[in-house]
Amino acid sequence: MLSEQLKQLQGSPTAKFFRLAKEREAQGHDIIHLEIGQPDFQPLPPIVNATIEAINQGKTTYAISSGIPELREKIASVYSEDHSVELNPNEEIIVTSGAKQGILASIYALLNRGDKILFPEPYWVSYPDMTRLSGGQFLTVPMQEDFSLNQEAIKETLSNTQVKALLINSPNNPTGHILSSSELFFVKDLIEDANLMIIADEIYNDYMYIPSSFKTILTELKDWRENIIVVNGFSKTYSMTGFRLGYSIANKSLSQGILRFIQASTSCATTFCQWGAVTALEHRLDAQKVIEDVFPARRQLLLDEVSTVDGLSLDSVDGAFYGFIKYTYSDKPSELVVEEILNHANVATIPGTAFGDSADGYFRVAFSRSEDEIKEAFKRIREFMK
Ligand SMILES: Cc1ncc(COP(=O)(O)O)c(C=O)c1O
């Protein structure tokens, strides 16, 4: 009965591990949840108040599909002030229901049926199903050991196969890798040489722990903007995951395509949440301060804790809030390792293979939890491994 189109979707590869953790919790075990990828702080009070006020003022009807002008204008002014990128809010910015819808709509906007998109592996778990849904096809190229782009392998793939687009995610989920200037230079060459289109998922760009000269590739690749779609959102910086709000930045014609996708699916992003988002951007320095006060210390704690466990290693976490931990104490597949850690240490994590087959031998922990929970999790893992 179910359409072929939907039969080929594989569902969330992380869902199984959420379920196993929940089942064990329901049996009375005290589980530390390091599998969940969302910030643990509340949205700032002014954001919540502005959203409630919008409801009280009756801003509860459909909004214009591209997003309320006040939000698009605010996004444009933030890009101008913070990143020196000038955007036309009426032509180049579309407000979406989460960055997720923005990425899906971008894939639809770029790919004809059968067209290919390439993403470096490990990749965010949703990209494959998004591509399948659009009728496109994906190719993956494993990153290098240090999680940087494997430039030779990407070039080789592009010389053998017709590829329309490259999807990059920096800071990366799950590896934390931030694209370096030289990697961006390589991306620029791909645009020039192969006329490649780029989707840049920048949802974690307020979580950076190493100096980086840019927070958006638009500052670096100004002259190649025609070929670039940037997607970002409010979930991670402002802890507004349930508001479901994001945006795309693209040229006029691609933005029109993304807009049609929205008109055919959700009509518009939730109106009163968009008013909350205007206030969020007004308070962006406060939100960045919340992150700076808490996350660098958690990251350091995670690096220190992992270094005390024989058979585990974590060389770096440059951005986002995940540790992609390599295990050498076992040669079992990562799915089994993760199940063992859950069943014996009561710590929930996500196996590397959820992010692509080449990521076996790793598991992901999120450090969007308190320092006490991180410490306790590794105490349990150390005991289990003994
Ligand atoms: C890499 C990446 N991109 C996009 C998203 C989607 O974010 P949103 O909540 O804005 O849809 C996530 C959420 O986990 C993510 O990890």
Image (cartoon, grey):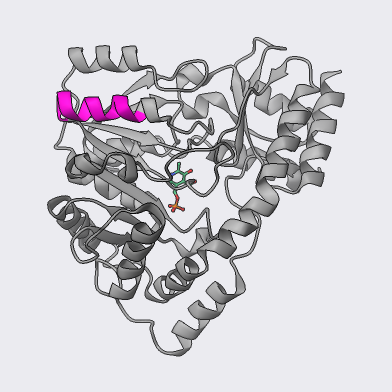
The count of marks equals 0
Q: What residue is rendered at 45% in x and 83% in y?
A: 54
Residue 173: x and y in percent read 50, 36
Residue 343: x and y in percent read 76, 30
Question: Does 90 lie within the magenta span?
Answer: no
Question: Does 186 lie within the magenta span?
Answer: yes
Q: What residue is rendered at 24% in x and 73% in y?
A: 64
Residue 70: x and y in percent read 33, 75
Which of the pair 253/26 is nearer the observer?
Answer: 253
Which of the pair 304/376 is nearer the observer?
Answer: 304
Q: What residue is rendered at 34% in x and 30% in y?
A: 184
Q: What residue is rendered at 67% in x and 43% in y?
A: 296
Q: Is residue 278 left or right of residue 89?
A: right
Which of the pair 3/347 is nearer the observer?
Answer: 347
The span shown in magenta is 184-195
On the question of residue 33 being in view, the answer is: no
The quadrant of the picture occupied by the N terminus is: top left
Residue 81 image-quadrant placement: bottom left
Which of the pair 308/292 is nearer the observer?
Answer: 292
Residue 88 image-quadrant placement: bottom left
- Name the outermost residue toward the bottom: 57
Residue 349: x and y in percent read 65, 34
Residue 222 image-quadrant placement: top left
The quadrant of the picture occupied by the C terminus is: top right
Q: Is residue 290 left or right of residue 236?
A: right
On the question of residue 219 being in view, the answer is: yes
Secondary structure mostly seen in magenta is: helix
Up the image or down, 84 lies above or below 5; here it is: below
Q: Is residue 307 left or right of residue 72?
A: right
